Image (cartoon, helix red, strand yellow):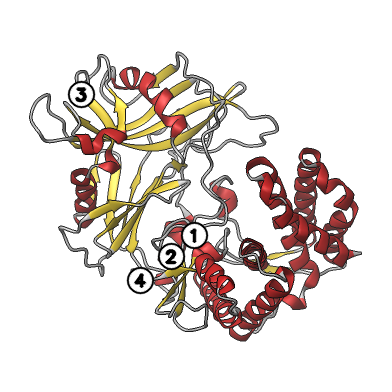
Amino acid sequence: MPEAPLSRGAHHPPTAVPRDQPPPAAVRTTAAAGPPGLLTSLAPLLAEWLPRQRWFAGKGRPVTGFALVSATELLPWRASGGTPGLLHLLIRAEQPEPPGHRHGFGCGHRRGAAASDCYQLLLGARPALPPSLAPALIGQPSGGPLDGQTVYEALADPRLTTLLLERLRMPGRLGPLRFVREPSSAIPSALAPRVMTAEQSNSSVVYGDTFILKLFRRVSPGTNPDLELPLALARTGCSRVPAPAAWFEAEPPAEGAGPRPEPFTLGVLQPFLAGSRDGWQLALDALAAGGDFTDAARALGHATAEVHLAMARALPTSVLRRPQIEHLAAAMSERLDSAAAAVPALQPYRTALHGAYEDLAALGRAGRTWAAQRIHGDLHLGQALLTGNSGDGGGGGRWSLIDFEGEPSRPLAERRRPQPPVRDIAGMLRSFDYAAAVGRHERPQEWAGRTRAAYCAGYAEASGTDPRDEPELLRAHETDKAVYEVLYEARHRPDWLSVPMTAIHRLAATRA
């Protein structure tokens, strides 16, 4: 788990670069923007460097082409002298479509059997790198406007990350980039930057233990929920979520006769909750000390309900009726079948697990409805921070929720869709099971059961609705989450497969 708050904590580790990553080959380039020759000179370097990054989503598939969406000089480079240059790029990386892939991502482009994801890159340029920046090296372009320069990952350079903060302090436009600052926010200058090392799908820079800038790496048109939701919550007065102080976005060029795409959300600056600890580590500490976590879980349930209630006030809601409920159950069944085909251990449980989804669909056919609203979308113990606690796992301190991006692998439109709040609750309940297993409690299901009950009770106290009162809805969502975990663990951490399989056994037995 990350040691600093406001990072993307999770009980899943960063995805490693596969050892069988295909070597880079000659790639196509398309540059409708930027200086002549820029993309052509960078493409061989990026084809090798990009797949090695932790946040690159297309690991295991070759990069076959690049297309330049935009190029902006945040700080011009010079052929001589000690001042580094800073170049902001939005680049589409084209790759073969993965087997069974149902949708595109990023800029939404497809070319035959290829798909493309759009990435945000921040490149530094110097004639030569000092030893401290050697690990950030990308390479030396041949030809083009950067000929003779050494290009590197700009976030490793404190001079350049300081410049990013200054851009956010002074809102305005620069080419396609637009920097916005909340009028009420006070952002001091000269805050020492440091890059966080625990990120998986994004990158973050902490400024003087005062602010944290989260930079989205794989981007797509539309407002990112990690800006949209905290901003809406702040305007309702909800203090459980750090309010954005500033952000920046890019306006992509229009393509063809169609409407101009929505702006890309590129980065969000929020208060850094110094001294806080995430719920995952607190739960493990409580388990290691033989302590109880029910008071903390009850308070966390209360905080979750407060955030859900505030989102329902701030943003549109809807009602799930028979067609939507049947569609939801069918999508869950489809994911189960796909996972069972890949993980044979699921096969004996398929009938019972499908039954949980059928129970949900049957209620829809009988006229049952459920409210849907905007939710966190990827809630677990690593996304909850406790400030002011003694560290003993008790209920003291105050919980905050962070990282409202949702599951980054899902399309942005899907992540912004209203959903039953119970999906967040199911994610947190699964996180308690993981903590009990990883913490090696002698009776993990008993510990998790007490903690789960306390969390649901806290949620009911604040919301007036106990998620346990709708067992079919909760069981279907928890089953769907456990099926996802089985597939994840089988692919990435086979030694952990027993954790979600224990839940699968329990959920199947409950249905039976």
- Mark 2–mark 3 Cα distance, whole angstroms, equals 40 Å
In the image, taking residue 4 as reference, residue 139 lies left or right, namely left
Farthest residue toward the left?
81
SS at mark 4 in the image = loop
Q: Of the residues under marks 3 and 1, which one precedes in the sequence?
A: 3
Q: Is residue 235 visible?
A: yes
Q: Tag 2 or tag 1, which sits nearer the N-term?
A: 2
SS class of the residue under badge 3?
loop
Closer mark to the observer between disc 3 and disc 1:
3
- Which mark identifies residue 453? none
Residue under label 3: 149
Residue type pointed to by label 2: Pro
Q: Nearer the viewer, residue 432 or 225?
A: 432
Tag 3: residue type? Gln
Residue where numbered disc 4 is placed: 275
- Residue 395 position within the rendered picture, expressed as x and y whole percent measured from the top left: 52, 83
Helix, strand or loop at mark 1: loop
Give how far apart the Cα atoms at labels 1 and 2 are.
Answer: 8 Å
Tag 1 residue? 404
